[in-house]
Image: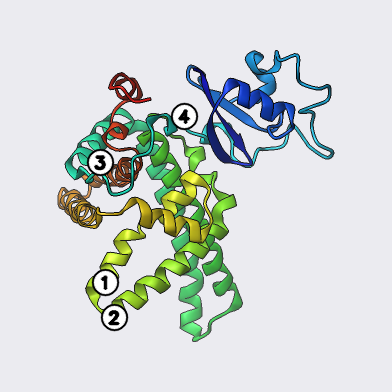
Amino acid sequence: MQTWYYSKGGAQMGPVATDELKRLIAHGEVNLHSDLVWTEGMANWQAPAQVEALIASPSAPAGVGTAEPGFNPYAAPITAPENLLAPVGDLGEITPGSMQLEVMDCLRRAVELTKRHFGTLLLIGIVYLVIYFVLGLVEGLVGGTAMERGELPPSLILIKIVNALISIVIGAGLTRAALNVSSGGEASIGDLFGQTGKILSIIGASLLVYLIIAVGFILLIVPGIYLAIRLSFFMTAIVDRNLGPVEALKYSWQITTNNALPIFGLMLLSMLIILAGVIALLVGLVFALPVVTLAYTLAYRFLQYGPNALRDRATAVGAGVV
């Protein structure tokens, strides 16, 4: 049976059967022009109106799926089609805590994907670092002048706020790129700037996490570390599933069940890999940073879908995954 995924306002949903998707279109729940659909075999997400199999239904009433008043079909979508990865939902989610995270498998897969996509990842990393350098340079110039005068001008406060917001956007964009690669898709520089609509959710979740972790460290250091580990996937969940702040924290807590120790081990190994990159005259960081980033994202996918998430799609399907 053919299954479909559809996207409304940047939120990915599905899978649904062909008849169910046609029903959603017929009732106006999926718009023929402004929403997007994808199924196995399609190279990219498309509007339903562009897919013959979905518009050939005679039962659809006239006028259904036409653009809503004020809709501009030429306006940029909330989430561009190239930022929507091929779904991994067909793997089937595992019961949280039912499998222990395979840390070394995540790292091996991260090395493999880094080699496969090295050129693209390097370019994304360069753009990411250039943006950070420019932000730091502007803040440093304004801040240095202010410190000489012993002042804290409003312009410096504004620059700090803008820098923080831009850092959130490109940080979420980097997560999006890593999710795309980890899920068997492609990454692009555009991924860095495609998550602006999730700023408020990320800020809200970050504040909650900092508050919770602070309480944990006040009680004892170990509880603080434990809480940080269990909540560490909150931003990945927001980018991946378009969750709100509280829902993202709950989801991170859920998928990390019985896996705090392996995740902590992955964090320690990641630190060692980065340290090795620094020791290698900093050149090693060019390879170490994408490996660490992908390993962490692959761990997230493993906790969702088990070991099949670490295989190429064709291999995973051949292994008997529905």
Q: Are marks 1 and 3 in contact (CB under 8 Å)?
A: no
* Residue 219: mark in rendering: 2
- Sequence-wise, which precedes: disc 2 or disc 3? 2
Q: From the top left corner, tell me how far across and down residue 255 is, in percent.
A: 35, 50
Q: Which residue is mark 1?
A: 223
Question: What's the residue type where badge 2 is placed?
Answer: Leu
* Residue 287: mark in rendering: 3
Q: Quadrant of residue 19?
A: top right
- Sequence-wise, which precedes: disc 2 or disc 4? 4
> What distance separates the C-alpha of mark 2 from that of mark 4?
43 Å
Q: Quadrant of residue 314?
A: top left
> What distance separates the C-alpha of mark 3 from that of mark 4?
25 Å
> What distance separates the C-alpha of mark 1 from that of mark 2?
7 Å
Q: Which residue is mark 4?
A: 86
- Sequence-wise, which precedes: disc 4 or disc 1? 4
Report the label total.
4
Q: Of 195 and 216, which appears nearest the observer?
A: 216
In front: mark 2 or mark 4? 2
Q: Are marks 1 and 2 in contact (CB under 8 Å)?
A: yes
Say which element carries label 4: loop
> What distance separates the C-alpha of mark 1 from that of mark 3?
33 Å
Question: What's the residue type where badge 3 is placed?
Answer: Phe
Say which element carries label 2: helix
Say which element carries label 3: helix
Say which element carries label 1: helix
